[in-house]
C-alpha cells in the first residue's frame, strides 16, 4: 500500500511540478517585451467591448434596453476571449514546445493544460474588472452567483477539450490553425454575445425558434449562464428557463461531456507520435 502510494506521489508530484513551471513560464512569455505587460489581459477585452458597444448597442440599437447591458456585454466578451485564447494558444502548444517534449519526459497533455491555466488566470483578472463595473453600475447581485464557479468550470472544460483536440490535429495538419480562425468568427457571430437574444425573439419573432436553438451551443449556453447568475438573472435567457423538457436542457451539457471525452481520446491516441512527427 505504501509502495503504491509513493509511486503515485512520485508520478503525479513530478507532473504537478512540471505543470507549475510551465504555467509560470507561459504567463511570463505571453507578455514578454510588452510595455504594458499583464495589463493587456484587461485592455484587450475592454477595447473590444468599447468598439462593440458603440457599433452594436449605440448605432445599431442591439440592446436589451436595461442599464446592466454594458456589463453583460463586457462579461460576454471576456468569457468568449477566454475560449479563443485558450484554444488559440493550446492549439499551437505541442508544436511550440516540440523541443522540450523531445528532451524531457513528461505527460504531453501538461503542455496544453498549462496554456489553458494561463488563460484562466487572465479570465480571473477580467472578472475582477467586470465586478468593479457591476458595482459601479449598482448591479443587484443574487444568490445565483454561487453557481458561477460551476459555470466557469464548464466553460473551462469546453475550451480545454477543443484545445486538446485541435492541438493534436495541428501536429499533423498545419491548416487546422487557419480553419479555426475562420470557425471562431462564425461561432462568435452565431452566438448572443454582442447582441442580446431578446433582440431577435422580440423584434423578429419569426426567428424565435432558431434564436433559442443558439442556446444548444454549449459555449453560448455557458456564457448565458454566467451572465444570468453573475449580473442579470431577470433579462438573460438560458436553457434552464427557455425550454420545458429536462432532456432538452441537458443537451449542451451532454455535448460538453462528449467534447471532453473526444478531446482526451484523440489526444491520448496520438500523443506517442508527436515527437516523431515534429
Image: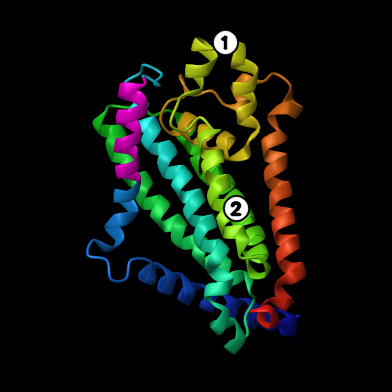
Residue at the location (45% across, 26% down)?
Answer: 195
The tally of labels here is 2
Is residue 12 positioned above or below 145 on the image? below
Report the disc number at residue 243: none
Q: Which residue is identified by label 2?
A: 179
**Is any part of residue 224 visible from this angle?**
yes
SS class, disc 2: helix
Residue 125 x, y percent position in the rendering: 35, 52
- Viewer-side residue, 185 vs 22: 185
The magenta stretch spans residue 1? no
Q: Nearer the viewer, mark 1 or mark 2?
A: 2
Q: Circles 1 and 2: CB distance less than 8 Å?
A: no
Q: Residues within 10 Å of mark 1 (few under 14, many from 20)?
A: few
In the rendered view, does 151 fall on the left or right side of 257? left
Residue 34 x, y percent position in the rendering: 27, 66
SS class, disc 1: helix
Residue 217 x, y percent position in the rendering: 63, 36
In the rendered view, does 61 fall on the left or right side of 119? left
Report the disc number at residue 205: 1
Where are the magenta residues, as a range? 45-60
The magenta stretch spans residue 56? yes
**Is any part of residue 68 visible from this angle?**
no
- Viewer-side residue, 224 vs 169: 169
The residue most toward the bottom is 103
- Viewer-side residue, 192 vs 69: 192
- Viewer-side residue, 157 vs 212: 212
Residue at the location (63% across, 79% down)?
Answer: 278
Amino acid at each position: 500500500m505504501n509502495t503504491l502510494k509513493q509511486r503515485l506521489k512520485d508520478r503525479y508530484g513530478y507532473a504537478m511540478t512540471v505543470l507549475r513551471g510551465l504555467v509560470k513560464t507561459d504567463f511570463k512569455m505571453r507578455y514578454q517585451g510588452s510595455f504594458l505587460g499583464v495589463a493587456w489581459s484587461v485592455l484587450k477585452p475592454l477595447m473590444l467591448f468599447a468598439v462593440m458597444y458603440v457599433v452594436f448597442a449605440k448605432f445599431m440599437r442591439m440592446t436589451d434596453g436595461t442599464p446592466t447591458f454594458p456589463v453583460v456585454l463586457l462579461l460576454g466578451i471576456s468569457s468568449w476571449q477566454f475560449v479563443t485564447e485558450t484554444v488559440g494558444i493550446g492549439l499551437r502548444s505541442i508544436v511550440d514546445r516540440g523541443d522540450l517534449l523531445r528532451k524531457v519526459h513528461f505527460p504531453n497533455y501538461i503542455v496544453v493544460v498549462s496554456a489553458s491555466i494561463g488563460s484562466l488566470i487572465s479570465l480571473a483578472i477580467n472578472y475582477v474588472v467586470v465586478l468593479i463595473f457591476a458595482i459601479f453600475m449598482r448591479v443587484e447581485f443574487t444568490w445565483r452567483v454561487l453557481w458561477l464557479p460551476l459555470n466557469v468550470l464548464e466553460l473551462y472544460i469546453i475550451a480545454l477539450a477543443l484545445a486538446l483536440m485541435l492541438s493534436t490535429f495541428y501536429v499533423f495538419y498545419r491548416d487546422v490553425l487557419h480553419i479555426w480562425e475562420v470557425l471562431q468568427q462564425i461561432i462568435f457571430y452565431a452566438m448572443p454575445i454582442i447582441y442580446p437574444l431578446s433582440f431577435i425573439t422580440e423584434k423578429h419573432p419569426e426567428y424565435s425558434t432558431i434564436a433559442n436553438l443558439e442556446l444548444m451551443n454549449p459555449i453560448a449556453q455557458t456564457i448565458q449562464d454566467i451572465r444570468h447568475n453573475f449580473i442579470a438573472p431577470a433579462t438573460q435567457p438560458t436553457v434552464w428557463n427557455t425550454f420545458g423538457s429536462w432532456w432538452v436542457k441537458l443537451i449542451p451539457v451532454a455535448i460538453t461531456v462528449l467534447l471532453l471525452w473526444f478531446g482526451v481520446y484523440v489526444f491520448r491516441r496520438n500523443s506517442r507520435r508527436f515527437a516523431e512527427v515534429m
